[in-house]
Image (cartoon, rainbow, N blue to C red):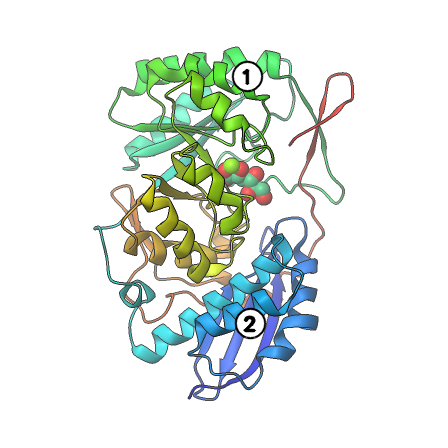
Amino acid sequence: MPKITAAKTIVTCPGRNFVTLKIETSDGVTGVGDATLNGRELSVKSYLDDHVIPCLIGRDAHRIEDIWQYLYKGAYWRRGPVTMTSIAAVDMALWDIKGKLAGLPVYQLLGGANRSGVMVYGHANGETIDDTITRAGEYLAAGYRAVRLQTGVPGMTGTYGVSKDKFFYEPADADLPTETVWSSERYLPVVPELFAAAREALGWDIHLLHDVHHRLKPIEAARLGKDLEPYRPFWIEDPTPAENQDAFRLIRQHTTTPLAVGEIFNSIWDCKALIENQLIDYIRATVTHAGGITHLRRIAALADLYGVRTGCHGATDLSPVSMAAALHVDLSIPNFGVQEYMRHTAETDAVFPHAYAFADGQLHPGDAPGLGVDIDEAAAAKFPYRRAFLPVARLQDGTMHDW
Ligand code: GCO
Ligand code: MG
């Protein structure tokens, strides 16, 4: 049996922070897992170093489900982003090891490919509607079949989703949280204008997405969904914070615009009511923050029963290890919808050499055994950790708002 002989966490900041778990086995085979939780990176590192790794040594690396259950039930204090990201990192690393030992890419172990590749969406953003559409046109020309549109709100600085560097959007931008200002009243009319102009300029042969980023009240989100209906958005994402899941019933009563939720969910229990009550159309839980490949597949299987498809989070704060793991899941499940794809910087790609590749609007995980991604530890060591926080949002009168 391949025994776990050692495990360590590696923190690196090739432009942004990433935490990676590397597990070694008695066969000499190693596996990697992404343990990055944006803005709270060192909490996960400590959870792994202090509370998980000591319990892994000597275990059979093949027993993925048993180790998952052991870490989940054994913690007693279940769920939460730090715990579930830690479990996810172990799970990914063990699937990587299993694939390498079998000589197969992980998607083959998960049942094989269900499709030629994984449709991805890119991020088009700009200060103005024209800028955003120009960026979206570039994605179209590059072969993308889906693109997310975000634009500046006149009079507001620091609108969510609009970045200085147009290509490598990175919200965790400062040593202490940046303060941004928000106005739902100003935002609400801008998005339908953006979508009208986008359909006019780009036509109908492209999926258009939008992220509300938890900013609206339920009735405002219902209004936005209704206003966007003529432009057939692929989805609106996180229309309201999802702690109150009944809000989605209200939104649903008013609009047929598809709803996507779940990038901050960390277990199937966060998704269950939304899925079973058919209050959403896409579930965005990630392999890194929702317990790894093992748990994400369970969420996808539940979603499939209710006609809900996946649309996994794939922001740059998830490392290429996470992207690779997501692609193996995406390729192998029946109810895949779309995969978010924000490109990493060249420095990040150099630290994490990977087999996945983009062609014709799709990503494919490649056919290397395991996840097909690694960490170059010497390259990683050149980029020490830098504290970085996500921003906060306040209304114009200073009231704290959801970011
Ligand atoms: C998305 C997300 C990201 C998050 C980021 C936070 O849809 O891609 O909303 O942009 O804000 O992942 O760390
Ligand atoms: Mg989002």
Q: Position of residue 336 (x, y in %)?
A: 31, 46
Residue 72 position (above or below residue 387)? below
**Amino acid type assigned to the residue bearing label 1 in the image:** Ile
Q: Which residue is mark 2?
A: 70
* Amino acid tagged 2: Tyr
The quadrant of the rendering that contains the C terminus is top right
Res. 324 image quadrant: bottom left
Quadrant in which residue 13 is drawn = bottom right
Mark 1 / mark 2, whichever is N-terminal: 2
Q: Quadrant of the N terminus?
A: bottom left
Neighbours of disc 2 within 10 Å: few (<14), some (14-19), many (20+): some
- Residue 93 or residue 160, whichever sits in front: 93
User: In this figure, what is the number of numbered marks?
Assistant: 2
- Disc on res. 219: 1
Can residue 334 be seen at all in this image of the molecule? yes
- Give coordinates of residue 145: x percent, y percent: 29, 34
Q: Would you say the residues marked 1 and 2 are in contact, meaning their CB atoms lie under 8 Å apart?
A: no
In this picture, residue 192 sits left or right of residue 84: left
Residue 218, given in percent of the width and then of the height, sits at 56, 21
